[in-house]
Image (cartoon, rainbow, N blue to C red):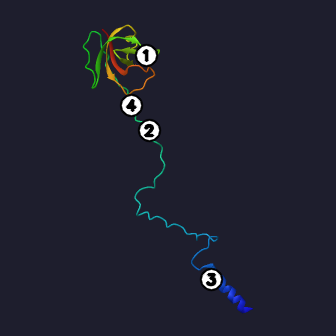
């Protein structure tokens, strides 16, 4: 009987595989080595909130006096003269193929002959869907 126990014990030891775990046994649990603080000079990456959008400071313009000299247009600005017409959409004003954006509404009325200074904005999307958007910097009746 002792011989049977010895043979069974030897067989179990051989089946247990001294170095290889069986699929039912799983992997041995080990812990990852702790990082050396001397090797890392930066903090670990963390999720951060998106950067806030750039702020746009308001532009202060000098008023143009009717009797005084006109200020030169800003860089990239152009001057357009003609008669203001109503656009196909309510509230839209047109001048010589340009859709007027901004400017003094008491000067820019349908039927008024005006000269406006500003910048064409061909990439700007508007609800008027007509003409090239034109940001008005100044306007005067002519």
Q: Is residue 13 above or below residue 79?
A: below
Left or right of 58 on screen, residue 27: right
Q: Secondary structure at mark 1?
A: loop
Q: Given this view, does label 1 or label 3 mark the residue nearer the observer?
A: 3
The numbered disc on residue 92 is 1
**Which dot, 2 or 3, sits closer to the camera?**
3
Callout 1 environment at 10 Å: few (<14), some (14 to 19), or many (20+)?
some
- Note whether 137 is above or below 2 in the view shown: above
Q: Give the residue pinned by disc 4.
A: 56
Q: Earlier in the sequence, mark 1 or mark 3?
A: 3
Distance between mark 4 and mark 2 Cα atoms: 12 Å
Q: Secondary structure at mark 3?
A: helix
Residue 128 in the image, given as x and y percentages of width and height: 44, 20
Q: Are marks 3 and 4 in contact (CB under 8 Å)?
A: no
Q: Position of residue 93 (x, y in %)?
A: 40, 15
Q: Earlier in the sequence, mark 3 or mark 4?
A: 3
Callout 4 touching callout 2 (CB < 8 Å):
no
Q: CA distance from mark 2 to mark 3?
A: 66 Å
Dot 2: what SS?
A: loop
Mark 2 vs mark 3: which is more N-terminal? 3
Q: Nearer the viewer, mark 3 or mark 4?
A: 3
Q: Position of residue 114 (x, y in %)?
A: 33, 11
> Label 1 vs label 3: CA separation?
91 Å
Sequence-wise, the earlier of marks 1 and 2 is: 2
The part of the image, by quadrant, that contains residue 2 is bottom right
- Residue displayed at 42% across by 26% down: 125
- For residue 52, the mark is 2
User: Mark 3 — residue?
Assistant: 14
């Amino acid at each position: 009987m002792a011989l049977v126990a010895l043979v069974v014990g030897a067989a179990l030891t051989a089946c247990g595989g001294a170095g290889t775990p069986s699929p039912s046994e799983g992997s041995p649990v080990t812990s990852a080595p702790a990082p050396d603080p001397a090797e890392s000079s930066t903090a670990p990456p963390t999720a951060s909130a998106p950067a806030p959008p750039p702020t746009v400071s308001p532009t202060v313009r000098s008023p143009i006096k009717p009797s005084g000299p006109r200020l030169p247009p800003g860089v990239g600005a152009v001057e357009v003269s003609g008669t203001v017409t109503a656009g196909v959409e309510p509230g839209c004003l047109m001048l010589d193929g340009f859709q007027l954006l901004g400017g003094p509404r008491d000067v820019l009325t349908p039927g008024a002959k005006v000269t406006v200074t500003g910048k064409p904005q061909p990439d700007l999307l508007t609800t008027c869907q007509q003409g090239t958007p034109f940001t008005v910097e100044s306007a005067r009746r002519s």
